[in-house]
Image (spheres, coloured by chain):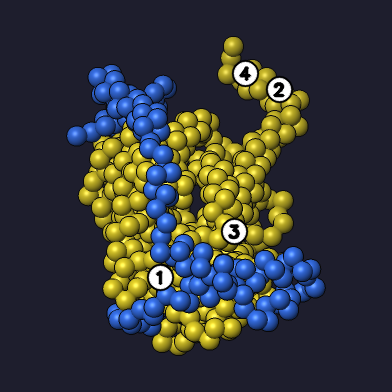
Amino acid sequence: MPTEAQQLLDTLVESKFAESIEGLKFLGTFVSESFYYWASVFMLIIHVGFLAYEGGASRTKNVLATMLKNLLTLASVGLAFFFFGWWIYNAFPLFPVTGPILGPWTDFENASDNVKGLKALVEASYPWSEALGPNTADNLTGVFWFAFSLFAMTTASILSGALIERVKIGGYLILSVILGSITWVIAAAWGWSASGWLVTNFGYHDFGCAGVVHGVAGFFALGVLLNLGPRIGKFDENGKPRAILPHNLPLTMVGLLLIFVGFYAFLAACVIFLPSYKVETTIYNTPMTLASIGVSTTLSLAAGLVGAYISSKAEPFMTISGGLTGIICAAGAMDVYHPAIVIILAFIGSFLMPKVIYWVESLGIDDPVGALGVHAWGGLFGSVVTGIAAAGYPQGETYPAINLGGQLLGAFLCTIVLGFIPGYVCSLILKQLGLLRVSREEEMAGLDLSDLGMIGYPEYATVSFVAEQAKQSSGEMSGSGNLATELE
Amino acid sequence: MSTSPFSSFKEYVEAKGAIYTFANNSTAITILLILSLLVFLGLLVFSCLMKSRLSEQQTPSPNLVAMSVALLTGFLPGLGDWQPPRRQEGLAQGAIATVLASIGLGSALKKRRRWRKYSRYL
């Protein structure tokens, strides 16, 4: 047919079906919007899990304060992420290697192409941006903010468990803001962004945020723990650790299983599908499928449980922590790993996790929930092993392929530069200001009484309550305030 | 060593089919599957061979002895009057509290430990 006739026909068809085409286009937008919305809602289950996990891991005298501290993470990080966290993610991808920090001061019109390309994202990230409020011209910015804010809260929650039973609530909330809305966000801008310089210049690949979330948070926690110190009674005069038992291990285990559920949503939200897309991609615009994430998450969870179960000789807390470790160890390149590799990596990482936890304890570091073994170790392993197990995968036309050097650099930046150093320095400052740790008297009495003026189980003669009564009656008791510890 | 079946980015993004590691190397996939099968079998073997922990519990510890003494002989005055912070408890609760408190007294019979390196947190 002649071109003009074809064009006339196309115009007639389009005008007849214009409404349907518009509707189909919006359907694509709504699918994206809904997908990230519900994935983020499911990610909230991670916080339900952390609440139960940490509450169960504490002693009865600290259960309410522990849970409240974890709950308030949603508030501190959520608000901070609105005011500046989301802007940091969009402002830092180029800094300091390929461009400046982007903000209201940036002259986008006269900037380089890579800066100009980020203008819309940066301007939509300010708290005064029209994109963050109800806006019929933008159905996506808000829901991406929602998803990222849940990532941020998850990152900060990793810190909260390591500090239970002796941290001051105000000091913890300040640290949660620094970790949840500044340091991990910078790591994400550099290494979990299509334009991040770690990706464009070094080929760093971290699909499921092994280094960017878990490595940063785990090593941040390490830095804080060095200044916070162990719980009273955790180590004897020879430095030998005493077991301070969780008051409710079943609750802790239920919490971890809820975290597993939320992690499925976390990894699903790492898949990118936008209205104009014909395929799913990673954050790096490389191909992937959501279906394979379902397979890989399940297998890494299973193999992680096996590794820790065997390594710890069936210790329940270690075993269930192994499930999470397994997922983290395989997360770095879960978009491309064959299922057999997922199983092997998850098994190896989680088999070593209990060893790491015991080693950390032998160094005199008190980590009540094993955050260093699960997140610091798992994140480091997951990030570095990507450079071996997924080596050679192209990342872009001009970007380096996945390589061990890039992964080592990324792991170093995540764990040390954005994890350990900020955690150590910030907690040291808080310690000097008297904002880091509760007093000895408060810790002995329990944070529920000293922070909240109430106890978590008022109808039960709990071990710590009875121990306190015995102390008052006998006038003498050594060390820990924990009868379970005393009876060892 | 490259685990990628693709040599260029164009080939990668235009791929229609398997994109996973070693997708072009069936020998490697076979070896990896055998290794991952061993993980699965390892779980079954380990769980079947795990020994009962019952034998580890049969020797009473000194602390248990102290507890027994306290239970048989220790009743602290005044704890019969103990009431929880929120509401009045019956005699049964008071008796249980007395017994538990006597356990606390039994633990206080242990000699004090020496203070050393972690004395701040002891």
Mark 1 vs mark 2: in front = 1
Q: Residue A375: give x, y in percent of width and height.
A: 40, 55
Label 4: element kind: helix
- Amino acid marked by disc 1: Lys
Observer-nearest of B59 and A307 = B59
Classify 10 Å Cα crowding around label 4: few (below 14), some (14-19), many (20 and above): few
Mark 4 vs mark 1: in front = 1
- State the separation of the CA atoms marked 4 and 2: 10 Å
Residue A6, disc: 4
Q: Which chain is blue?
A: B
Q: Name the residue furthest left.
A: B1
Residue under pointer 2: A13
Residue under pointer 3: A51
* Chain A shade in the render: yellow
Q: Marks 4 and 2: CB-CB under 8 Å?
A: no
- Amino acid marked by disc 3: Leu
- State the separation of the CA atoms marked 3 and 4: 63 Å
Q: Residue A52: give x, y in percent of width and height.
A: 59, 56
Report if residue B47 is visible in the image.
yes
Q: Where A389 falls versus A100 (above or below)?
A: above
Residue under pointer 1: A234
Q: Is residue B8 left or right of residue A290?
A: left
Label 1: element kind: loop
- State the separation of the CA atoms marked 3 and 1: 23 Å
